Image (spheres, coloured by chain):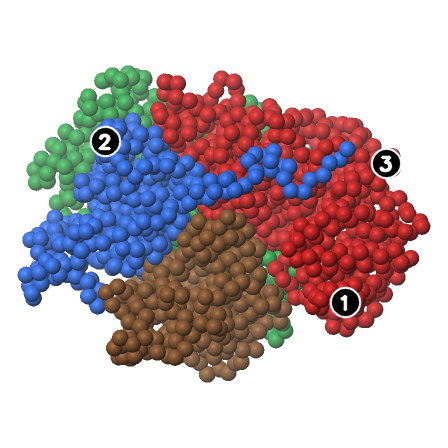
Chain colours: A red, B green, C blue, D brown
Amino acid sequence: MNNKANVVEKEAVVIRFSGDSGDGMQLTGNLFTDESALFGNDVATFPDYPAEIRAPQGTVGGVSGFQVHFGQKKIHTPGDYADVLVAMNPAALMANRRWIKKGGTVITDVDTFNEKNFQKAGFKTEDPISELKLEDYNVILAPISTLTKEALKDSGLDTKSILRSKNMFALGICYNLFDKPFDNTFKYFEKKFGKKPQIVDANKRVLQAGFDYASNVHALPSYRVEPAQIEKGKYRSISGNQATAWGLLAAAEKANLPIFCGSYPITPATEILQYIADRQDLGAKTFQAEDEIAGICTAIGASFAGNFAVTTTSGPGLALKTEAAGLAVITELPLVIVNVQRGGPSTGLPTKTEQADLMQALYARNGESPLPVIAASSPSDCFDYAFEAGRIALEHMTPVILLTDGFIANGTAPMRIRPMSEFPVITPRIAKNNGSKYLPYARPEDGSMTREWAIPGTPGLEHRIGGLEKMATTGTVSYVPENHQVMTDQRQAKVDQVIVKVPNQEIIGDQTGDLLVIGWGGTKGHLYDAVDELRIQGYKIGLASFNYINPLPKNTGDILTKFKNVIVAEINSGQFVNYLRMNHPKFDYHQYNKVQGLPFTVEELKDAFRKLL
Amino acid sequence: MNNKANVVEKEAVVIRFSGDSGDGMQLTGNLFTDESALFGNDVATFPDYPAEIRAPQGTVGGVSGFQVHFGQKKIHTPGDYADVLVAMNPAALMANRRWIKKGGTVITDVDTFNEKNFQKAGFKTEDPISELKLEDYNVILAPISTLTKEALKDSGLDTKSILRSKNMFALGICYNLFDKPFDNTFKYFEKKFGKKPQIVDANKRVLQAGFDYASNVHALPSYRVEPAQIEKGKYRSISGNQATAWGLLAAAEKANLPIFCGSYPITPATEILQYIADRQDLGAKTFQAEDEIAGICTAIGASFAGNFAVTTTSGPGLALKTEAAGLAVITELPLVIVNVQRGGPSTGLPTKTEQADLMQALYARNGESPLPVIAASSPSDCFDYAFEAGRIALEHMTPVILLTDGFIANGTAPMRIRPMSEFPVITPRIAKNNGSKYLPYARPEDGSMTREWAIPGTPGLEHRIGGLEKMATTGTVSYVPENHQVMTDQRQAKVDQVIVKVPNQEIIGDQTGDLLVIGWGGTKGHLYDAVDELRIQGYKIGLASFNYINPLPKNTGDILTKFKNVIVAEINSGQFVNYLRMNHPKFDYHQYNKVQGLPFTVEELKDAFRKLL
Amino acid sequence: MLENNIEVQKYTAADFKSDQEVRWCPGCGDHAVLNAVQKAMAEIGHPKENYAVISGIGCSSRFPYYMNTYGFHGIHGRAGAIASGVKTANPKLSVWQVTGDGDALAIGGNHFIHEIRRNIDLNILLFNNEIYGLTKGQYSPTTKYGQKTKTSPYGTIEQPFKVGQLAMGAGATFFARALDNNIKHATETFVKAEAHRGTSVIEILVNCVIYSDQTHAAITDKEFKEDRQLFLEHGQKMIFGKEKNKGIVLNQGGLQVVTIGENGITEADILVHNAKNQDPIVHMMLANMQAPEMPVALGVIRAVEAYTYEVALEQKIEETKAASKIHSMDDLLNSGETWVVK
Amino acid sequence: MLENNIEVQKYTAADFKSDQEVRWCPGCGDHAVLNAVQKAMAEIGHPKENYAVISGIGCSSRFPYYMNTYGFHGIHGRAGAIASGVKTANPKLSVWQVTGDGDALAIGGNHFIHEIRRNIDLNILLFNNEIYGLTKGQYSPTTKYGQKTKTSPYGTIEQPFKVGQLAMGAGATFFARALDNNIKHATETFVKAEAHRGTSVIEILVNCVIYSDQTHAAITDKEFKEDRQLFLEHGQKMIFGKEKNKGIVLNQGGLQVVTIGENGITEADILVHNAKNQDPIVHMMLANMQAPEMPVALGVIRAVEAYTYEVALEQKIEETKAASKIHSMDDLLNSGETWVVK
Ligand SMILES: Cc1ncc(C[n+]2csc(CCOP(=O)(O)OP(=O)(O)O)c2C)c(N)n1
Ligand SMILES: Cc1ncc(C[n+]2csc(CCOP(=O)(O)OP(=O)(O)O)c2C)c(N)n1
Ligand code: SF4
Ligand code: SF4
Ligand SMILES: [Mg+2]
Ligand SMILES: [Mg+2]
């Protein structure tokens, strides 16, 4: 507990930790996040790495950041602007200048203020504060390096090792600032460096020194953010990529099938493959293929062979998979294709986020080649939509594209742990040898259009499938013109049938009114906050954030009629809005689009929406 | 000249030659076509091969057909139904039963009527005429084999060789039927078999025998189709694929650049590569790549290196090229991508036609990745649109997708030969070393947005480009958010600028009225005939057949206002209509769609249109 | 896992014929190979439902339709990747990849070298007719230098791959060669390929009567075939020729043809074939022998033991399972850092 | 066409440095290679505007940005195809392909074997750090068996490619090996690669300090590097070792290390390197030598003459032009069957 007099209560706070790639900012941020979550706050975080593996020290390109948003209310985004910026060097100041909340607090290591560092960071003067016009901000020039050295002067560690722990000094300051306990952080030191008590001790001492320093600096404000009213239960922190991987593993478990993941690494999707590869203990097979084509083709082979098959990638990789995706469509094999969207076109901005692969997901196949497309909208619901993608693929015998994006894939948020018994059982329609001839493309009478899956190795169900057009029911190759129409229509009807289990699109906020905001996928958090804040201001506004794209929920046309205006906001030049124009042409749509490799900010959204209110 | 009494004048006639793959039907059809063209008829033809290289003899799968439509009016399609069907065996009868015009003439070789052949062809009885309900047709059971043998009994040839010329007997019958000279056919024999006078003589004799036979069969009608009123000039017959290849060669010549074609064979696009490969005499370089990806990537390399680069493919191949197409978009290099559409999805119906790659052409790239898309609409205008694709690519520094389809690619029609001086000069914007620093992504002041092309080997213009987002003007790699927006918008604006030289969309027929028929690409001929015939019946109907898809012609919105109803007819499930809904959302569109691997028939179109009249 | 030994079940080749009409050209070499495969599968005797035949696109790739087994006619070039997925996912299957010289070595070249490198237990039947048959006669990566084809009207300017050398360059543990006009030998070779654990590459020289007729005539022509075909058997001397008096010796300059009884050469001098030598160098020399200077090596050229990918993977999984505390999704979700909100 | 001989123009390495900040990790082996290439280009002395540097995607593939030449940073795996297009379209350029073990051998494997087969005159600089650097540490097709990486948390189960064997399997006319920590030798090797007409594959063993640090230590470690590095020179004996007393001999069992002065071995017994031998067998043996049992071969292992693709193509075009009556589109349009409508 700090010993400040005036503790200010806050609903929610954004801290951004930033420093050189080597400064340990990701760890610092994670530790702070864990303490906040344990304390009972709701949290959301976002890491912001440099594009280079190790960009030159001290430069803006080399700055690594970690933003955490925590509150006593429900937190939907990692926050637009930081209440507190921790900047370990001038470059970190420079890199984050635009992301500090007006009048916010900046804590920086004044010991790094020297000519060389100013120059590397691109400052023209030796006065970064006025150069960045931070005079009206609460800037704390803390001698972090000096005090870290001071704290460890008797530790017996060399200077390099000592300085490596200066991030803990900064963390100590922050714990003080927000009046947080730090038992968990101490436990982490013990667990992590258990074998090196010297290091455990050093970290503890530096952290405590930072905490104490802050107690004595009266310029430092003191805040308190009470625990949030969030659903009771056991929680864990999860990133979107991890949640996607685990959601897929969960689907395999509930379908009682082995999982096979054929993938090729690509930013920002690689971690999904890695998280699945970690799970050999659950019997997961990962096949790191020679390229994306082999990734999807091995998965198609595995699907034919009876596994729950998935392939994971990002935009350029999806481009390479489209021919084979068509093969999965025509053979009607279950397959989940995960596409973590990043900035395009081409290699584009590989480490940045974007929503510009929607058209690619929907239409990038030759011929009439429909497949279901769904999108996740937060780090934790990646679990649910990955599971759902698996369910749809397996129950409808179809490839499914699941879209996430760099923003939710890399961001983390708490996820409530639900027992697997709460999830629905997935029931693939596996063919049995019941004596009568197996007809691979027979459609059942229940109207679902789903063909039966005959697993190689099953006696009596030997059959051949392939990429040529096939005769309805029997599946033999057919060039008969009318049959091609029949099969084209059946493939479409099968995808349309997915709608049966798709929930109605929910409207958040006002159910009728002046403006319906439409979004899809990873923008949900920002859209939510913008709509929520405008409603508090008295506007009649609702939000429909879509997760089901193809097919669209049944009530889509309905909800469009309920508002005077409709605006579709996307991180692209207008793909979903065009898709709506195709499917619901009777309506007028406004658009708000941004293609900057960044998520929306709540402020810009509010500005845009207000124009229509 | 035949010696029949009642010669009936006809505006236009459709003949379909059909027989076993080995029966020489393609040659027969071509010879007939050449005679018709020389005589002054307008013509259009379409070959119809079996999917297999050599399907089993005598079976329906092994039937090879060649349809020719010739007339004294302008001919727009190879015709829906045949006035005359030549069927060399029962399988040919069976295969073409649906394509005979009600009450038409069927000439068949009665010598092939035996149990074995009936069975192979799938007849259930030994009476094919009643089984196929051809009683009301004018069926000529000609003893073609017997009479061929008879004609050559003294020729010294063996039976196998003799029977090989029975197609000439059938051809002779047809010449008689249409009162055609056959000097050219005789010349062909002399040229082709010059070194084997025995064969020349045999062919002539059989042809004459067929002709004479027909003179004596009074059941055979006799028609005359006068020369057509077509534009004066020198003509040649050309297929769509040949015209595409030659149009590209022409663009290279008019741009004064070497052509480089990097492709991988794929039905039905392979011939384009072959026609370009034939032209080493014009300096054309073809690179038969290891796959489609290498096809486009070698072309991109060639484009970077300063050649006029093209790559040619069909749907599944286009799928493989989409990642690299995005590279061409972001590097802003000129490149023509030809996609000859075939039946999909996946391998689908490789030898059949379809228009279902439109969405793929428009959107199958990751990120916001716009490029111009144009489509050819007849075998001969493939030349013009291939040329135009080259012009746009080179003058606007962009990849361009040219869409054709299996129907126009394989079909042939006469093309008027225009001297190359009548074609516009193509002016690529090639950078010169004028002393100032070369800025690869600088945009000129003329508003065209086209960057300059610096050819490697030019001193002083050394520069680097690539697939990462680039700083406006300088082209260096940039992660700056606002710059990404700027470049995204510039790439779009550049494609939009193509519109400056795009002609207004023409309406054929009534300029205002009750129904506007919209089509695009290879359906133009059928749509034309349907609209024309309905107009003759007094309906107020117009046709807009689009060749420019992205960007759409400037007046597109305009013309939509001029009719009470609009219907979009496509050989897919509705792709262009959706594209129109996106771009011109204020209108209501009806649709007519067919996905059978076949072109439209004029009849079905008329039926569909009449419902809205 | 499949056992190495031949099973007892009794099949005849006819049991492996599907009800689909075979649609290759009359005279196409593929017919004979189909025959040989059906015979081999009957002889091997795995339960029919355990065979999976996976192909790409090409004339040869129509193969699965004619087999009364599980079959998958994939997309062009991807037979290797699809087959790799099938075997890895379901190791109990006996997986046969059917592919052409274009399918495997042009568009599918990458999957080909990688499946070999991984040593997945597949039988790759590579139908080498030195042409793209299905697309009607363009040159392929094995077409002979200078050949005129539809896309090389003035003759090709590309050196063909040597299939064996490429496969062994990629690390092949098994390489064999067979001919379409020797069904008996082809059948035997396929049986041996199946017995090998790992990727078995079998180059089958097939004749395309339409677009590359007689391309293998230098080897198969009746007149001199006995002098140009060397049938290798592990542990046997490399003797061939009409009079069975020719042999291969290995000296500093490489492999050489000698005549027994001439220049003091006796049978004892002739090289004994060791297909099991881990070092691929001699196998490459054998695979590279070209007619007419040398006989062409047929049969199993290389068959060495090594870990197969799918077995290694299953073993890792067993080990990891045994060592881990996580056995279900519930375990996983509750592992590591968690906290409770009350 | 580029002439084989070194031109007179005077450049220094600095002339080849671009104005872009080099963004590899401090200590990354790529820095040294950049240096060596800049030196080599200066030494070769072609006019600067005639160099084109083409890469794929990967840490190493950022290379073109740092070169003050024409440069193209392509897409992942396609460097070979793009470079093939550049050279075929514009043969006067000196084309350098820069690629990683992932870029060239995983996703780009097919282009790699085909450019080699075609023998297009390119210099392929293959940066082999046995890892995917840019995507932060997954195993690559050259990662050692059993290695733990981000995607093989329990160790890989894949055999790595042997780069030289694969390249020669595909028909390479030139193969060399260089080290990131020997700039002088690397520079010399690059100059020799440029002098070779045809596809020159140079495997450069580079260190990724972040994700596969020390992966080449068995070769480069100061302590024993002299005993494990064999610098080959055409026409020179294969002698190496701290004391320059070790050598390579070739006998029935293949290559073997011997010590001069022991067991009666004299210098005369040591193998003389013949890089120009058309037969690749000995070159493969050399390329496959692995430490610690054998020294690792460095320098030019193979350099044989053969037709290059782009030259053959230009020749065919000249021949065809000379033989044809068609010299323009007008000629073409009016050729063959035509008719006149009046
Ligand atoms: C993506 C794609 N590219 C190209 C093709 C066209 N194609 C089909 S088979 C084939 C080559 C066949 O040659 P090969 O594999 O040698 O088989 P063969 O017909 O000779 O047995 C080609 C180019 C295709 N179907 N798909
Ligand atoms: C189509 C596509 N797939 C995957 C990636 C992701 N990716 C970029 S570089 C790379 C591997 C890099 O390894 P390597 O070629 O060895 O280069 P290094 O970074 O080690 O120098 C991968 C998988 C990509 N950019 N594009
Ligand atoms: S074209 Fe050639 S390969 Fe194809 S079926 Fe006919 S003979 Fe066989
Ligand atoms: S990650 Fe490795 S390969 Fe990439 S720049 Fe750093 S050291 Fe070099
Ligand atoms: Mg072939
Ligand atoms: Mg690497």
Query: Disc 2 versus disc 3: distance between alpha carbons?
Result: 78 Å
Residue assigned mark 1? A153
Residue type at mark 1 is Lys
Q: Nearer the viewer, mark 2 or mark 1?
A: 1
Subunit ID for the residue under disc 1: A
Say whether marks 2 and 3 touch (CB < 8 Å).
Answer: no
How far separated are the C-alphas under marks 2 and 1?
Answer: 84 Å
Query: Residue at horizontal 31%, vertical 46%?
Result: C200
Extreme residue toward the right, this view: A5
Q: Chain of mark 3?
A: A
Choose mark 3 or mark 1, whichever is in front. Answer: 1
- Which residue, given by chain and number where applicable, does mark 3 sit on? A536
Residue A565: quarter of image: top right
- Viewer-closest of D82 and A112: A112
N-terminal-most mark, 3 or 1: 1
Q: Name the residue type under label 2.
A: Ala
At which x and y percent is residue C313?
Answer: 44, 43
Percent position (x, y) of residue A599? 71, 47
Q: Are the residues flagged by discs 3 and 1 in contact, CB closer than 8 Å?
A: no
Q: Are marks 3 and 1 on the same chain?
A: yes
Quick check: C325 above or below D47? above
Q: Residue at x 39, y 31 (%)?
A: A456
